[in-house]
Image (spheres, rainbow, N blue to C red):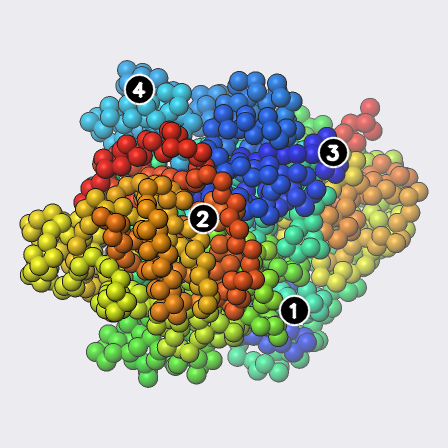
Amino acid sequence: MSNQRKPATLALEDGIVVHGFSIGAEGTVGGELCFNTSMTGYQEIFTDPSYYGQLMMMTYPHIGNYGTTTGDDEAPKVMISGLIVRSFSQEYSNLNADGGLQEYMIKNHLVGITGVDTRRLVRHIREKGVMNAVISSEGLSDAELVEKAKHWDSMNGLELASRVTRKEAQTLPAETNESRFRVAVMDYGVKLSILKNLTRRGCTLRVFPAKTSPEEVKEWNPDGYFLSNGPGDPNASASYALPILELAKKEKKPVFGICLGHQLMALSEGLQVGKMFVGHRGANQPVKNIRTGLVEITTQNHGFAVLEETLNEEVASVTHVNLNDRSIEGLRFNQFTGFSVQYHPEASPGPHDSAYLFDEFIRDLETHHT
Amino acid sequence: MPRRDDIHKILIIGSGPIVIGQACEFDYSGTQACRSLKEEGYQVVLINSNPATIMTDPMMADAIYLQPLTTDSIKEIVEKERPDAVLPTMGGQTALNLARDLYLEGYWEKEGIKIIGVDMDAVNITEDRQLFRDLMEEIGIEQCRSRTAESLLDAKEIVEELGGLPIVIRPSFTLGGSGGGIVWNHDELEQKVIRGLEMSPVHQVLIEESIVGWKEYELELLRDRNDNVVIICSIENLDPMGVHTGDSVTVAPTQTLTDKQYQRLRDAAIRMMRSIGTFAGGCNVQFAVSPDGEKLVAIEINPRVSRSSALASKATGYPIAKIATKLAVGYTLDELPNPITQVSSACFEPSIDYVVVKVPRFNFDKFPGADEVLTTQMKAVGEVMSIGRTFNESLNKAWQSLEVGRAGLGADGYEVLDRKAVAERLEKPYWDRTMQIRNAFKLGASVAEINDITKVDPWFLTQIEKLVTLENRTEGQSLDSINTKDLHELKQNGFSDVQISWLLSKDGKTVTEEQVRTKRKEAGLVPVFKMVDTCAGEFPAKTPYYYSTYEGENESEITPREKVLILGSGPNRIGQGIEFDYSCVHAVLAAKEMGYETIMVNCNPETVSTDFDIADKLYFEPVYWERVLDIIEHEKPKGVILQVGGQTALKLGKRFKEAGIHIFGTEFEKIDFAEDRGEFSRFLKELNILFPEYGAARNAEQAVEIASKIGYPVLIRPSYVLGGQGMRIAVKEEELRRYVERILKTHPENDFLIDKYLDQAIEVDVDSVYDGEQIHIAGIMQHIEPAGVHSGDSTAVIPTYSLSDEVLAKINEVQETIAHEMQIVGFLNVQYAVKDEKVFVLEANPRSTRTIPFLAKAHNRPEAKIGVKVMLGAKLKEFDLTSHLKHWAIKEPVFPFDKFPGVKKELGPEMKSTGESIYFMENFKDERFRKPYEFKNLYLSK
């Protein structure tokens, strides 16, 4: 107990300061303060590139209970910039685990704070909207930290995908006996489980860095395109993503987009994407599939969304809506073969209800292949 | 798709009297179902024989039949009411089995009645162990290896096949695992197989390989007609496989599973529910997971609302029974709003930002000779649930809720830290396992050692170890030396002021609870109240459902309205069951009708009183002094009602009085005085009212002296106990000495009383309400069994059937005299013995009793509400006091002897029944009267 008693401070840009104890690495970090309501799956969340640069507050109080497991990472490194919890568990119990969360955080240079009334802050953000904050275990004064939080880069207009994308293109073979399709994956911060969902279904993947030119992608001669999830403001990623989409459309190849990829596809068809007041982050978001009438419980992680008022039936039809706030969760594009969802059918963490979307992409590929 | 229009009138089958394995959670579900259907404009017809239920109150259904739960009564009701649908999923296994019997007869089909909420084929599959097995195999869900036996010979063969003992026995179609158990050796095998075969209505038992020690999980599911499925709650059992889930300490949500492991359970649960039919409703699935997390086996699936769904509802705030009912009549999940937030959808999976711990409550003290080792057959009589921000906080709160005299998980002066005793107690699962784990840590055991013996997951053990570390750190300190930070940490970990005072007294100087309270309040350490909102704060919620914790922000806003705080009755146990919850709910409704804002405090997840839409505000908290006082200091109510919550509430009376908190109704001194036999007898003497001779003693010599003076047989009992606990009849000195010895062991601090036992007397139980001017006799109940059998265990008849007019007049007169002289405001119950036309007063209870709901149902008159309203200042003349009872009503007790095979059925002054049913009879030829009448003396024991 004694070694986790070093004090730490969390300061919000609007002046709220709370004190707790340091966990993980020591230091001072900042970012957009957001919360996630998943009760399991913290390791997957910490390594989800869509969370790059954000301060993650877990609403479930005990975090660390089952330690960490190598195979559960969604990217080669931790993506969140800081962690806020109510009750950190240095001790863990799970026979699959290969270490505790404390060691994992230190190894990954992740700064965190425990002993915080997280619920109060969740309610605060819910009322006031998302904002920036700073965590520090370096003894800085409250005033200094608030100042730092105020000057931290706003997520609005921030281009982050290029910071989490891979440096070089990489080919991943299909996991099935024969490779059925070649899919170009645009990596804006792609989660490993998305790639697995595709290779498991017989796709050979070429995963391209975010800013790869359309020419280079075309050269690989893909059967279809996948636009990944990722962090930051989609408007800031449009400059390099839209040319790829133009290519796909011109080639008449099926496109599938998830999260940021979904937003980019919408942008490419003239829809607008804006920042949400709070965002959706959790593994319990109900989404209704309008075509089947069925509901799927989904994993979500987004602070931007397609603006409904800019929707134009000619270019896109809504396929999925969020049952809580009726926001757009999925689109089928009418001018080209493509569909996209705002949420995460690959789950990890979260329910597997939406995995069928990968099959749908395969069907699109099949239809176009013959 | 909206609600179904092809049905208009729906029959709901209740669960009948409270028994082990089927308790008041089915009043919760039945009540929610009735309200839910009425909201939708359906006509509701209800059958239930349990009078102490809210669901059988007149406002709940259009037609209520308080009749025995038999296929015959159902047919009779169907004849008369012509319902077009039946909802059998709200009344536990009882309702489901009845519906199934009628289904097999082809009755529902013949009458054109649709079964909603479940498929009967699904019931068959889930109850027929072999069918279930085959189906699971088909859908690729692993099972423990097992086979069904129909004879002892079969069973022996199967045991060999499975590679020998230990094995688990599970009889088909029984309740709460009745007749089941783990068999460790060959001697037990024969006996347990035969018992299981006897108890199974189809005479089948499943012989299953033992996976004792695996981790156990439960998921609560809801599905709609479109086949949308959501998981409402996940539950992890702290007690590994081998202990019935109803007897296990359970925690929500799961604590030690990674997301991948949890999603495997979720996928399997959904697949299982989809495999057993297409019905819309609720479902509970249980799994075992090997300690390494690799192997997953399905244990069972229950296609109905269950005890666990009641727990899951209270744990998450999501009203499962209410929504399951809406789904049964055709709504889909996406059409319904989340009733807690009112802004988000009901089609989601609740996320919680606190930890819920359920601890079962046992009553082995009532059944000497019963095997106290926990096994696959449920033995608990009730449970408590607690909510805290951490497991540690919740665990301490749960122990404060249990009402076993503890102030938390140890550190309160009661522990026996004998190394050998603790080690022995840990070897097998007992009811106090978490306490013994704490004791083991206190004695220096390690997590690995305890895990090795108990198989409890190391994560839980580590948390308990942390509590002990905190204890040890505190022990060296004094009230002056302890700093605010440490004190705060103790409070955050759920330690009560009593525990802290005890720890701080270890240096020799006694610190009191009050001193700790004062010190912490000076340091600003008061609890805040956080909301249970189903969504971890993601959406603003409207529902006033709170728990306490020691953190930053308080969410319970105070209104300017005048408030009444009603204390609940805590965990169900023998002597204090659903009857008190019934009165609590009526107290809330009565106070609301009188214009008050109502605040409910209770910790029993099986109850209607803890539904978030009963009181204006619900605090799901221990009915424990410190916690209640914290709420009172926050809410500042005008006063409290404690005469409806049984002993739980009543025993806090003195402290309310001392703290200057107003108690509605009869003055506390008078309540207290009725418990003091000496003073009460002097009072009766002054009024010329007869009572059996008695004396108070502190040791065996005094007892013998008193007994020889008043003459044998005598009744001996400790003072201040519940349900006649420890009460015995002694016919000679030797026996008397033996009982005295026993009482001194179990109640070392109490005096005990020696009463003259009136042999062959008739016992009469009278409930009344007095407003200072007028008395309302709610009922004079004559017991069939002789005086000496606890009133809760007696068959009571109203009106009386063999008392003379003179005796009745005398009883009326005495009742009024006592009420007047005691200055009763509200309830007064007096128990009498009538012998040779003389009326003796046995005891007086100035509070609502176990029989109030029975009388309310017998007369169809809201007795509980009348009493509470009088307490709050109303006058009896304002009420319509007409009785609607036509002939006779009988209260029939039910007993749990089938769960305790080693215990003989014998009735005496100590209560043993778990519940009762009501029966209306037209004449004395009725079998239901004649039978107990013929056998009335048979079971009388000491």
The local secondary structure at tag 2 comes to: helix
Which residue in the protein does label 3 denote? B5
Q: Are marks 2 and 3 in contact (CB under 8 Å)?
A: no
Sequence-earlier tag: 3 or 4: 3
Marks 3 and 4 sit apart, C-alpha to C-alpha, by 50 Å
* Quadrant position of residue A12: bottom right
Sequence-earlier tag: 2 or 3: 3
Disc 2: which chain? B
* Quadrant position of residue A170: top right
Whether marks 1 and 3 lie on the same chain: no
The local secondary structure at tag 1 comes to: helix
Decide: is A229 above or below A79: above
Q: Residue at x 58, y 65 (%)?
A: B594
Marks 1 and 3 sit apart, C-alpha to C-alpha, by 45 Å
Decide: is A158 above or below B350: below
Q: Is residue B522 left or right of residue B265?
A: left
Disc 3: which chain? B
Which residue in the protein does label 1 denote? A124
